[in-house]
Image (cartoon, coloured by chain):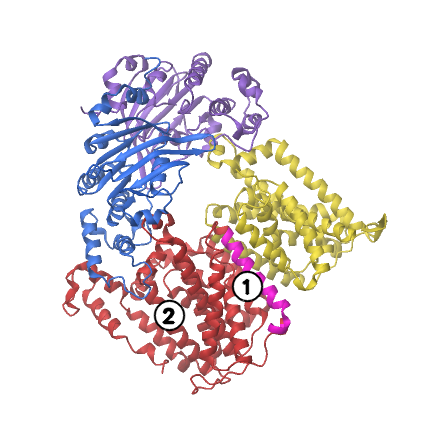
Chain colours: A purple, B red, C blue, D yellow
Amino acid sequence: MREILHVEKLSAGYGQAMVLHDIGFSLGEGRSLALLGRNGVGKTTLVNSLIGVTRRTAGTIRLGGADVTGFGPEKRARAGIGWVPQERNIFRSLTVLENLTAVARPGPWTPARVFTMFPRLGERRGNMGDQLSGGEQQMLAIGRALVLNPKLLLLDEPTEGLAPIIVEELLKALRDIFRAEGLAAIIVEQHARKILKITDDALILERGRVVHRAASAALVEDADTLQGFLGVARAAA
Amino acid sequence: MNMASPTTPLPAAGTAANAATAAGTAANVASPATAPDTASPARALLRRRRAWKPAEFLFWGAALLAPLALPRSMLLMNEIAILGLFALSLDLILGYAGIVSLGHAAFLGVGAYAAGLFALNVSADPLAGLVVAMLAASVLGFLTSFLVLRGTDLTRLMVTLGVALLLFEAANSWRSLTGGADGLQGIAMDPVLGLFDFDLKGRTAYFYSLAVLFLLFLAARRMMGSPFGLSLRALRDNRLRASASGVGVNGRLVLVYTLAAAYAGAAGGLLAQTTQFVSLDVLEFHRSADLMLVLIIGGTGWLYGGLIGAVLFELFQDVVSAATPQYWQFWVGLLLVVFVSGGREAVHKAGAALRQRVAALFGGRRP
Amino acid sequence: MNAPVLETIGLVKRFGGLLATNNVSFRLERGARHALIGPNGAGKTTFVNQLTGVVKPTEGQIRLEGRDITGSRPEARVRLGMSRTFQINQLFRTMTPLEMLLLVLGEREGRGLRFWSRLDARGDLVDEAAAIAARFRLDDAIDTTIATLSYGKQRQLEIAAAFAARPRVLLLDEPAAGVPEAERQDLLNIVADLPEDVSVLLIEHDMDLVFRFATRITVLVNGTVIADGEPAAIAADPAVRAAYLGEGEDA
Amino acid sequence: MLTILFDGVAYGMLLFILASGLAVTLGLMNFVNLAHGSFAMAGGYVTVVLMQRYGMGFLATLPVAFLVPALIGAVLERTLYRPLYDKSHLDQVLFSIGLVFMSVAAVDYFMGSQQQLVHVPSWLQGRFDVAGVGIGRYRSFVIAVCIVIAVLLQFVLTRTRFGSQLRAAVDDQRVARGLGIEVGTLFTLTFAIGSGLAGLGGALGAEMLGLDPTFPLKFMIYFLIVVTVGGRAGLIGPFLAALLIGVADVAGKYYLPQAGAFIIYAVMILVLLIRPQGLFAAAR
């Protein structure tokens, strides 16, 4: 199996604040990885460091064998990373369709195909980005990453703030994307159990370090580990 | 009499200066020669910070003695003193309180016209005229201070620029009062304190301006070293934290803006009285822009920046405009571009060691 | 005796259609060590911003020691005895720690308009500032420009400055965020050593810190308080587990 | 009366073309470029030089009056402007004032300080009457050109991929870059087009506004007013503001000559205080 992403000894943060320390992991072609951990442990910072919008102090990032450590974000995106940012960050003065066409690159994923997958977006293609509901924004953010036709998809808390029924719908769509397309993906999620069901592997972060790695299927059964690293109970207790 | 004061150290400053030299660099050793309550190193630290540094005495001593060395340049020196006072005024709001302004000439102009009109119509006494100039400018400062409280830096830049342009238009249109483009002519001043007549060589003018500058500088130094001055720096550094520390933001800004206006008014008053002429030029945009350059050259937030900037700016202008008078603006522009595009950092970096030493001598701090 | 030092009654905040704070009634007891936790986007920051006066609530009341402060300006609340730290450092970067502490002390004593007084005119305040610096392990950095301090030291100063206002209520917003391991212990000790008569509300993600420090925990999810109680009870609460692990409807 | 209105509209249209580049750099990219007028002046002098020294026709010089400032703009953006994007507004202001001063003095040095006359072709001179209202030919021409440009601009901004990428970059630069949009190139191009339009405006306006080395200083405040009063959300606000100011200024100078620019400045201050986001900006 070919390696899509290889991260080695990565340390990064914002300004003077250091958030990530010595992160290392790799991801194979078509594999999906759940990135778990409580609030503020550095999950989003890790995703942002992969796309290149944090301050990196050490380490390397290789994408499909090529060293992209020195690349700016736009170059990394072109090298094959599709990003669904945490706050969704829909371009609000663009229509739904423009949000897709402005970033689209040639490949199997086209705006039309996104509209087939999320019919509701198709119905609202003429609406401005800031007129969408939370769920629609999330679908658009995912669609916008897909039309980049990336090798690797980064999803930062895609279900946050959505109604349960929309979460189900979205997770189903994501599972289909992961399984059917053979697209590698990293997905950040606070709600571990839901996401473990649709991913292959999992990493748990704590205070900016990788503290646990496991196959998703095994981890979902491991209540003690989950509670210890992710629940509210004291880790040591 | 007030001309002698620069070399006469204030008693408090004198002892503090001794303490400063005695205590050396170690933060926790208080000199036994100082007052008994210096057991606390923190108190000694503060006292040393505010003490007069040798370089400060040197600076003012040089200013006082300069006419001996260059007796023919006293008109230029007078201009430097006035520009220095004007820059000091901008430093109060920009360097200490962080309020940006592109229209500081408004206060210079109001001060100049007030002093000129007062001399023509009421009394030719310089000191009374100076007070009137400061009052007039501070009234305008107080009224317009409310315009700079809200909005972003960009809004402030535009609003201050707008106010200055408005005043320019007003002065231009209201010919009966200001003389329009001809300006106020025929101003003749009485002797300063009834003793010193204004002469053609500018001797009285220079010493008069220098004395006013020095006294206002002393007051500014005291005020910026006070709890009030500290709270202004707090506002400049971080408004959010300042208000979370209990600083009433708007009140402080109104006060310092009014204060700075009064200082600029004094500079305008001096200009009118010592040149015995006021024209629309005092309200022109380039006055405000040049002033920015003066402060950039000298650095903001340590009071001496404006003064040193004024010296360098005027000397530079004197040299350059002797060569190419009508293209002087080109060099001002070039300096601005170079300074903002990294020249400032380069200069500061190159002279880092020197700067540190100078800053230590002056007791100021530059951000 | 049992009156809370800080209390909100039916607090509601709407941003457009979004309900960021949903009818929150919250009590901070005198001398409490109280933690406020919740997943991202739970509305913790909005809640704190209403407590400190940065954001105005849509409905409801905030009371500080029985006094209604719902409409007070931020600086007035500081004078009434409530101060805060910020999640992202908000410091006077060109000052020294000594000057920053003196500023806070001066404002506390109502000296902020004294334009002719000297900074060291009140020696007792200077000594107090030095003592606070020592308490927060900043005594070796008292005369260093703040911008050049290490991040951990800056975090310590962030708390010291809030503490210097001599608050009865202290709000700590993620005090340990971004602090490197080497400086972390200092910071935890400082938080643990805060005097008992100061009531502390801690907003934090780090469960180690929360469970080491707090004697009471409130859990906020989607702007609503879903649990409030002692740490053991919170840890066992099924609604809280669901909120944190995504258990619940499908578990 | 109607003639004044017409002249005002022509003046306003011209202001819009002159300021449209600033509407993008200041309004959308949030960069305060007070030197915008220097690019306009460059365009004006390109036309003057080409006509006087090389005998080119007025119309033929217009494309060059666009291209030369656009090129200068692109080079300056790449070298000097870009490092200032994330500096304070004060630094941007000082830097661009510096450029203004330099350009004023440089043009004075090379071209002299006198007013430059641009002779428009004879078929554009004079007036014709429509229902008793005197309509200047040249002003009609200016209005027509400006309408074409305004429509074109609005089309590019709202209907093309370039426009949507630009709006995306302005909405959220960080995310736009993270999604592969070449924000740097986009901004250079935008800056160049804005400078070019200013140049074109300078060339078109030389006959109506006059052209001498102090042009950038004289009109600096007008451009700023157009953008700040118009609001910084798009081009329609500045367009309306430019028309308003054009008509108000022409009418003011006709009916209340003593007041000078007084009213315009006062209105600007008032608008900034009451609606800092501008008159026509949509509330976000």
Residue B217 numbered mark, or none: 2
Q: Read off the magenta span.
A: B155-179
Q: Is residue B40 left or right of residue D200?
A: left
Q: Looking at the image, is C245 positioned above or below residue B363?
A: above
The part of the image, by quadrant, that contains residue C128 is: bottom left
Q: Is residue B350 visible?
A: yes
Q: Is residue D143 left or right of residue B318?
A: right
The part of the image, by quadrant, that contains residue B37 is: bottom left
Using a 10 Å C-alpha cutoff, classify the residue at mark 2 as few (fewer than 14 neighbours), some (14 to 19) or many (20 or more). Answer: many
Q: Amino acid at mark 2?
A: Phe
Q: Main secondary structure of the magenta part?
A: helix
Q: Is residue C226 left or right of residue D201?
A: left
Q: Position of residue C26 (x, y in %)?
A: 29, 33
Task: Look at mark 1 in the image and give the residue it sits on.
Answer: B286
Tell me what residue is drawn at x 22 percent, y 67 percent: B20
Tell me what residue is drawn at x 37 percent, y 80 percent: B3
Q: Looking at the image, is C150 positioned above or below residue B17?
A: above
Q: Looking at the image, is A160 positioned above or below residue C98?
A: above
CB within 8 Å, label 2 to label 1: no
Q: Chain of mark 2?
A: B
Residue D213 numbered mark, or none: none
Q: Position of residue D127 (x, y in %)?
A: 83, 52
Badge nearest the viewer, 2 or 1 = 2
SS at badge 2: helix
Residue C69 falls inside the magenta stretch? no
SS at badge 1: helix
Alpha carbons under labels 2 and 1: distance apart: 25 Å
Q: Chain of mark 1?
A: B
Residue B162 falls inside the magenta stretch? yes
User: Closest to the observer: C86 or B207?
Assistant: C86
Q: Amino acid at mark 1?
A: His
Q: Earlier in the sequence, mark 2 or mark 1?
A: 2
